[in-house]
Image (cartoon, grey):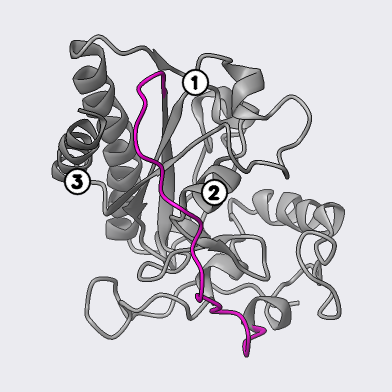
Amino acid sequence: MSHELKVQLINRLKQSGAYDVRIADPRNGFEHALPGQHPLELWPGCRSIIVYAVAMSPEANNTYAGPRAPWHGERNLGPIPTNIESDDFALDRLSRLFTASVTLKGTILLSGLGHQVKFVNPLAIQAKLCAFEAGLGVYGRSGLILHPELGTRLNIGLILTDAELPADSRLSEFFPCSDCGSCIRRCPAQAFDAEKNYPESFSREKCMTKRVQLAEQGLYCHNCYLVCPATRFDDQGLFSSREAVIFQN
């Protein structure tokens, strides 16, 4: 039954807008979870973490035009940059609505079958770690999750449930950063140390200081996301090839 439920759930989520869906077992792995952010600390009854990806626009995600989330409602900073076309914002908003819709559809399916579902504040759980453990992607040099096809162009969604679903394994033989340093070279905050590996290579203080400066101009720096060449879709027309805003050092 668990395998059939997994297939049914994946099909439902993909019909709702998810590009890829994977399952993580919170009882295995997660040795890098921060104190208080391990899934089983947040909900001891969790047996499966459903992790899914929704495709994102690289242009839209490199801007900041208001609150990043409902719990950041006071951060309505600055005007919409005039060099970013409105359709990018529409795609960005739609992708986030898709994520919420996917979560809702999955929740309805699981609840209808008698399973419990736990809503967790995204700030309280490490979504990237869940994606890594589920095999949705691997950590890039920048610390972003890189999907084998979407690269960095994804929004991660999570559903925690008590349903016992067959877990997927971490990705192996996928090393997109081995010969690349684009994110390191194009970081306006110079927040990365090319001689070290993530997370030791990343300075959160430098990154956030620069992002606050840009936010005062109504902009949201995500250079590491934008310049990453890991996505395979640039030449296939899924995303626009028009050049987006890239902040300089």
Q: How many marks?
A: 3
Q: Going 41% across and 56% down the picture, which residue do you hit?
A: 154
- First to last magenta residue range: 161-181
Query: Between marks 3 and 2, how big is the CA–CA gap?
Result: 20 Å
Instruction: Give above or below for 230 relative to 53.
Output: below
Vertical relation: 118 (above or below) 93? above
Q: Please tell me whether mark 1 sits on a helix, a strand or a loop.
A: loop
Identify the image quadrant of the C terminus.
bottom right
Q: Which residue is mark 1?
A: 46
Q: Which residue is mark 2?
A: 133
Earlier in the chain: of badge 3 and badge 2, it is: 3
Crowd class of label 1 (few under 14; some 14 to 19; many from 20; radius 10 Å): many
The answer for how far apart the CA atoms under marks 1 and 2 are is 15 Å
Name which residue lies at 78% across and 59% down. Answer: 199
Q: Is residue 164 left or right of residue 196?
A: left
Q: CA distance from mark 1 to mark 3?
A: 23 Å
Name the residue tied to disc 3: 14
Q: Amino acid at mark 3?
A: Lys
Which three-letter amino acid code belongs to the residue tagged 1? Cys
Quadrant hosting residue 113: top left
- In the image, what residue type sits under mark 2? Glu
Residue 122 in magenta stretch: no
Quarter placement of the N terminus: top left
